[in-house]
Every structure is written in structure tokens, then in C-alpha cells.
Image (tube, coloured by chain):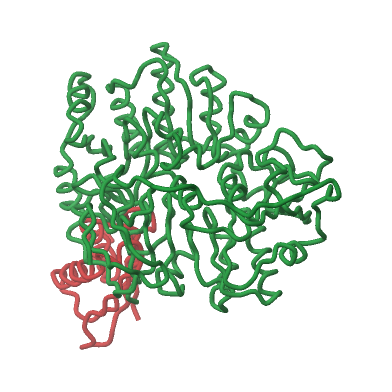
Amino acid sequence: MKTAQAGTLESMDCVVSLTEGAAGSGLAVTVGGASAARFGKAMEKRITETLQKLGARDLTVSVQDNGALDIVLEARVEAAWRRMTGGDGA
Amino acid sequence: MARNSVGRDLPEQIPGYGPVRPFSGHKARIPEGNRAGGKLKATFNDRTDKTVKDIKEAIKASGLRSGMTVSFHHHLRNGDYVVNQVIDACAEMGIRDLTLFPTALFGVHKALIPHIKSGVISRIMGSVNGPIGQLASEGGMESPVVLRSHGGRPRAVVAGDVKIDVAFIASPSADRYGNLSGRIGRSACGSMGYAVTDAEYADCVIAVTDNLVPFPLTPVSINQTKVDFVVAVDSIGDPAGIVSGTTQVTRDPMRLLIAHHAAALIESSPYFKDGISFQTGAGGISLAVAAFVREVMKARGIKGSFGLGGITSFFVDMLKEGLFEHLMDVQSFDLVAVKSIAENPNHVEISADWYANPWNSGAVVNMLDTVVLGATEVDRNFNANVNTEADGALLHGIGGHQDTASGAKLTIITTPLLRGRIPCVVDDVYTVTTPGEVVDAIVTEFGVAINPLRQDLIDAAKDAGDVPLVTIDELAERAHKMSGPMEPVATKDRIIGVVEWRDGTVIDVVRQLDK
């Protein structure tokens, strides 16, 4: 089972952890940490959209947040995905 | 339902609190009648030693029973052993249903949680920092927590809103006849200002000390005429948790920029001249503001009159340098401040009543020129929240926020525009602690918003030319653009916290989290 991680727990950053899921299992996203209470749904949506754009299908995604803005969240999700799939510059 | 003057809808009655008097302006409520008072007592020359064997014996002698109100002060902060020791003793003696009336509770007081669950404590009126605040927020208290400012609390005692049955006073030093001091002893905390009104108005006063000295102890924080019993214990607290070593100015460049803007605003104001009086919190930004102001005072040869509040080593240095004539100290934050109050006659101990009570013949906050405060969030109406966090949990007390904001001629709130992703300038704060009518400026790294009520300050800042002025709406919009829209806090209807304005009216309530 492939896994990958990107990010840190510095302020305004987050740690994104991806685990490959069984074919057809879809995207399962959980968000915890600093902003989850007030931005959890917005973050889940942004994570899902970013992964869909990258062509990801079956993944468990866990985000430990420490106040990341959307632009940081997207970058960390993309970095984790590229590490897992062995893409360029990973 | 009634709507108060900051737009909060309040019920007429809150279970466990009583009738609600809605807030209607910062100087609107004027009291009538006379002060309350404790029991009369006679003491003659057949009683010359007030010491008793232990806390249990003191409790027994005090007549403390189930259902009564017990008070504590928080000068021992997160090092305090006394609250836990006293409540443990009450529990063992079968006393239940107590109203706890501390000035504040800290993380160390999480040991009280089992006593809350078992019914030894049924109500808390006081600041609940940390774990007990979280418990209350999740619905773990029978009655709502009542939050009062440093001035609002003695007001409530003097006015008879709260009747203290037994005051337990942690005393770093005491003699056998009940003279108390915070200046010396292994658990020295400096000022004991929060305990003074409790000692005057409680029916019974018990001092708990770990440094019993020969009579007469002098100078005193609280004198023998107020104290009924003295208990010597092994230790009243952990010195490491009572005072910090030295208080540090922030090195974070963003926070230094905020402090720099705040200092520029102060320098532009009509109050920056000889005789200026000043209060800041002990937080990193506040101290940095003081550091910038200190340099300009030196450069321009300006001498201040007094520094007020919780006193840090930073203010002690300014006293030594002659930048202040006096320090008025209700709470000594660090070792340097504790040493200074013990040795320097110009470093004066004041009570919370003297510091901040609106219902006496004049508190020191009324003489204050400038105060620099923080907040968890502020809004487009300049209202400030210091009580609840972004997730809606009640985790902080009011402190002197309301009192100094109401009293000072120039009230500045410094805050980053965002903390993490959480915006700190919003459309409408989740909890109103301090109303916008007494907040003069919001200072962020993206600029300074001056309250439109203070055109004089806006003009002065424009004349100075180095204050980056923005509007509060610009700040709120910028924060919103960076963070995105926030989801509302999910709550139940039940009220778990009542935030009183310093005059006893209700400025806001906090509801139970839905989780």
C-alpha cells in the first residue's frame, strides 16, 4: 500500500498524508487541527477538488492543519500526490 | 428577550444566573444605596494567636457549609496549590454544592474537575482559563460561569451581588495574628491586590501560608484586622508556576511591525508628553510597543507619570530609568517585578478595587492615558472579544480589558490580521467582551484603523504622517479575502457563560458547544 506525506506543523502550514485505497473506494478526506472548526468543510472541498484535478481517484486523505490558507493547502496536497505517484520533482 | 446596546438578544432570566440586566452603554448604570459588608466581630486580648492546625480545622472553625460561596485570588497563577487543597478538604468533609468565586483559575486547577462532576462545586464565578473553560463550554457545569473584569469583580462584592462566606487567601508570608504579605517567602508573588476586597467583605477570612514569621509582619498587603484564621502548610505553590523568569519582547518581525505601528500612533496622539501614564499587557506585542515607546521617550526627553496593571520587568526597568515616577501594581508578573515591589517605595501595591472598580470614588484606570490591549478578535464596530476562541470555547477571562478600555483616554488593541487561517478582524465578533464605544484603534500589520468616533486622533495621526491609516472595513475585507468565509460555530441554546460588563449588566452570553 502506497503512502506519501507533505508539509509541516509550522504555523500557517499543514501536514497532508495520503494512503492509496482499494479500486473504487473513492476519496475519503478527514481534516483536523487549528481551523477545522470554522473552515473544515471549505478545506475538504478544496482538497477534493485539487485531487480530482490531478486525476486522483481512490485515496484516504488525512490533513493535520495548523492554520494553512487555501493556497498552502493546495500546494501540500499536490506535493503529497506527486510524491506518491513518483512524478517530476517529487 | 431584550436586545442590549451591542445588539445581543438576551433572555430576561438565565437559569443558574438570575435576572438579566442588559448592557446599555459603558457609563450608563449608576448605583443607588449603600455598600454591602461582612459580619461584625469582636476580638479581645484573650485571642492573640489565630493559627489553626490545618486547612480542615480552619474550614470547621469558619462555619463553612454546603451551598456557600468561597473565594480565592490568582496571584500564584499556574503554580497555585491552595485552591485544590481547600476543595479537596471540603470534599473529604462532605461539603457540597459550593459556589467557587476565584479571581481566575488556571491549568493547574484541572484537579477540580472531579469535584465539579461529583457536585462539590456546583457553580463558578470567575475566569476559567484552560481545561475548566473547555469543560464548561461542552456543558459540564450545572450553572453558567459568570465572567467579571478585574474591576467588575470587586464591584459585585461591594454592591452585594456576590456575598463571600469564606475567603481563602494564599499568603506567601503571614504572622500569627493575620498580617499578610506577598513580598517575601519562597512563594513570593509580589502584589496581592486581587485579594484585598475579598478580605474586607467576606464573613470569614482564612490565610494559608508556607512562611509563618514573627509578629508583626510589615509592610503588609492585608492587615490583621481582616483575617480570622491562619494556617501554615508545607507549600502554597510551585515558584516556577507563580512567576516567570524574565518577560521577553517578541522577536517575530510581523509582531514587531504591529508594535511599531502602535507606537507611532501613541507618539502621534496628544497624550504623548510629559506625565504620560501607560499600561500594556504582558504579551509579546504589548511589550514590544512599550519597548518602542521607551526609546522615543528617551530620545525626546519625555518623562511619564505612572505605569499601571500587571507589572513586568520591562516596566521595572522604565521606573529605574526615570521614565515613570511610579508603578501601580495589582499583579506582579515576574521575579524582577516581585523584587521591585518589595524594595522600591515608588512601586506601589494596589487592590483590584483601587485599580479598576467603576463603583467607588475613583479607580486608577480613570487616570490612565494609554493602554495597549490584545483580543482574540475585533469587529467592524470595534467590539473586542477576549473570552472565546475561534471554535467557540470559553477559554479566557476578561482581566482588566473592560476597565482599562473604559478608563483610558487612548485604548489600542493590537492584533495580527489572521492567526493561522482564523481572521482576527471580522464582521461581528462571536462574543462581545468590550464594546467598540471604548476602543479607539485597532492596530494590525496591514495598518491602523482608528474609531470614527475619534476624529481628533485621526487628525493627529494624519498630521504625524507615519501612521499607516486604513479603515476597519478595509481590514475586515482583507482578512475575509485571505481566509475565506467562516462556518458558524455549532451551538446548543443552553447558556454556559455570562459575560458581565464592569457595571454588572450583561454584555453577552456564551452558549454550549454542539459536539
In the image: residue A21, left or right of residue B224? left
Vertical order, B258 against B80 (above or below): above
Q: Position of residue B295 (x, y in %)?
A: 42, 20
Q: Position of residue B296 (x, y in %)?
A: 39, 18
Q: Is residue A6 visible?
A: no
Vertical order, B421 against B310 (above or below): below
Residue B257 versus residue A79: which sits nearer the camera? B257
Residue drawn at (39%, 42%) of the image? B403
Residue B506 versus residue B63: which sits nearer the camera? B63
Q: Position of residue A23 (x, y in %)?
A: 23, 87
In the image: residue B478, left or right of residue A31? left
In the image: residue B313, left or right of residue B395? right
The N terminus of chain B is located in which quarter? bottom left
Vertical order, B413 against A19 (above or below): above
Residue drawn at (57%, 58%) of the image? B164
Would you identify the image quadrant in which residue B235 lies?
Answer: bottom right
Q: Position of residue B61 (x, y in %)?
A: 75, 63
Would you identify the image quadrant in which residue B102 lies?
Answer: bottom right
Q: Is residue B455 visible?
A: yes
The C terminus of chain B is located in which quarter? bottom left
Chain letter for the red colouring in the rendering: A
Chain letter for the green colouring in the rendering: B
